[in-house]
Image (spheres, rainbow, N blue to C red):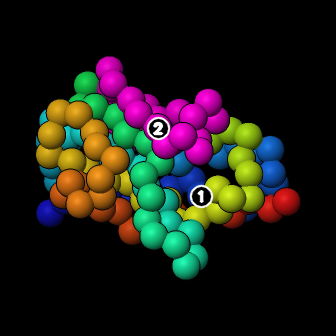
Amino acid sequence: QVQLVESGGGLVQAGGSLRLSCAASGLTFSTYAMGWFRQAPGKEREFVAGISWSGARTSYADSVKGRFTISRDNAKNLVYLQMNSLKPEDTAVYYCAADRSWVSTAQAYEYDYWGQGTQVTVSS
């Protein structure tokens, strides 16, 4: 049974930082590309960042470029999202997802497994 469990969300002031983690189990983690998505109230789920199976290739939404960094540790089955210079508009539930391919994609429908999400709230 595949499980993706996010952690690290919380309440932070604008300009602050958070690091999200996603622990994967039940799959051969190193063969999956991973992604982070987010969904704010009343909005559709949107792509935030993606990382290839090896970690060599990353991609970001324009809205987070230069502020967020995605990384992974294949030995520990973990993927991270370091979020700096947070803004109130970053407030959302953040989800990690696994894609049974080598390179990540921004399309949510391409992903095979999803976590339950972790809430990030940025106050102004």
Q: Which residue appears at 58% of the width and 65% of the height?
A: 92
Q: Secondary structure at mark 1?
A: loop
Q: Earlier in the sequence, mark 1 or mark 2?
A: 1
In reply to whether residue 76 is colored magenta, the answer given is yes
Quadrant (top left, top right, bottom left, bottom right) of the C terminus: bottom right
Quadrant (top left, top right, bottom left, bottom right) of the N terminus: bottom left
Extreme residue toward the front, this view: 62
Of residue 6 and residue 39, the one placed in the foreground of this image is 39
**Could you tell me residue 52's position as x and y percent?**
28, 31
Q: Is residue 83 left or right of residue 22?
A: right
Residue identifier under label 1: 9
Q: Is residue 33 left or right of residue 49?
A: left
Residue identifier under label 2: 60
Residue 72 higher or lower than 8, as above or below: above
Q: Is residue 122 left or right of residue 5?
A: right
Q: Secondary structure at mark 2?
A: strand
Segment tinted magenta in the rendering: 55-81
In reply to whether residue 37 is colored magenta, the answer given is no
Q: Which residue appears at 25% of the width and 50% of the height?
A: 98
Closer to the eye: label 1 or 2: 2
Q: Amino acid at mark 1?
A: Gly
Extreme residue toward the bottom, this view: 42
Report if residue 23 is visible in the image.
no
Q: Amino acid at mark 2?
A: Tyr
**Could you tell me residue 72's position as x and y percent?**
38, 33
